[in-house]
Image: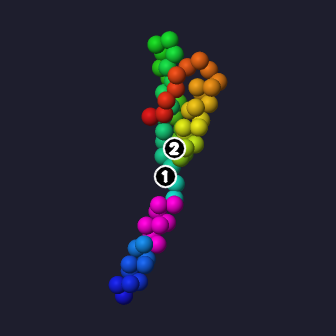
């Protein structure tokens, strides 16, 4: 019984570690003293960072993910 519990526990931890954590991220862009927050809802951190980096490329603003 202990072995089955241990195996199920390990499988649960593996499943949790491979699932992506989706939450809301905020990209803050500043230019000439003006600051704008852009919210990315229910997304992974990698996707939010990629989208925030596009704002840096597309404009002359300084954007960072928070």
Residue at the image point whose x is 59% and y is 35% from the top? 51
Quadrant of the drawing holding the C terminus: top left
Give the magenta range: 11-18
Relative to 14, is 48 above or below? Answer: above
Q: Is residue 42 visible?
A: no
Q: Provide residue 41's location: percent of width, then percent of height.
A: 53, 41
Q: Position of residue 15 (x, y in %)?
A: 49, 66
Residue 25 shows in the view: yes
Q: Position of residue 58 (x, y in %)?
A: 64, 24
Q: Which class describes the residues within 10 Å of circle 2: few (<14), some (14-19), or many (20+)?
A: some
Give me the disc on residue 7: none
Work out whether 25 lies above or below 29.
below
For the residue labelled by badge 1, is the local secondary structure a helix, a strand or a loop?
A: loop
* Scheme of image coloration: rainbow
Q: Tell me how far mark 1 sits from mark 2, CA to CA.
A: 8 Å
User: Residue lying furthest right in this view?
Assistant: 58
What residue do we see at 51% from left, 49% from top? 22
Q: Which residue is farthest top?
A: 32
Secondary structure, mark 2, is: helix
The quarter of the displayed image where residue 46 is located: top right
- In the rendered image, residue 17 lying in the magenta stretch gets the answer yes
Height in image: 13 above or below 50?
below
Seen from the viewer's position, the closer of residues 7 and 26 is 7
Residue 45 is tagged as 2
Q: Residue at x 53, y 46 (%)?
A: 44
Query: In percent of the image, x 41 and y 83: which residue is there?
Result: 4
Per the image, the residue denoted by label 1 is 21
Crowding at label 1, few (<14), some or many (≥20) Cα neighbours within 10 Å?
few
* x, y percent for residue 27: 50, 31
Left or right, 6 with respect to 64, comes to: left
**Which sits earlier in the primary sequence, circle 1 or circle 2?**
1
Labels 1 & 2 near each other (Cβ < 8 A): yes
């Amino acid at each position: 019984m202990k072995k089955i519990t241990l195996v199920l526990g390990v499988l649960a931890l593996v499943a949790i570690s491979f699932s992506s954590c989706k939450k809301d991220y905020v990209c803050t862009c500043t230019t000439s003293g003006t600051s704008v927050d852009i919210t990315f809802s229910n997304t992974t951190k990698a996707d939010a960072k990629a989208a925030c980096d596009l704002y840096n490329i597309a404009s002359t603003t300084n954007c960072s993910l928070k």
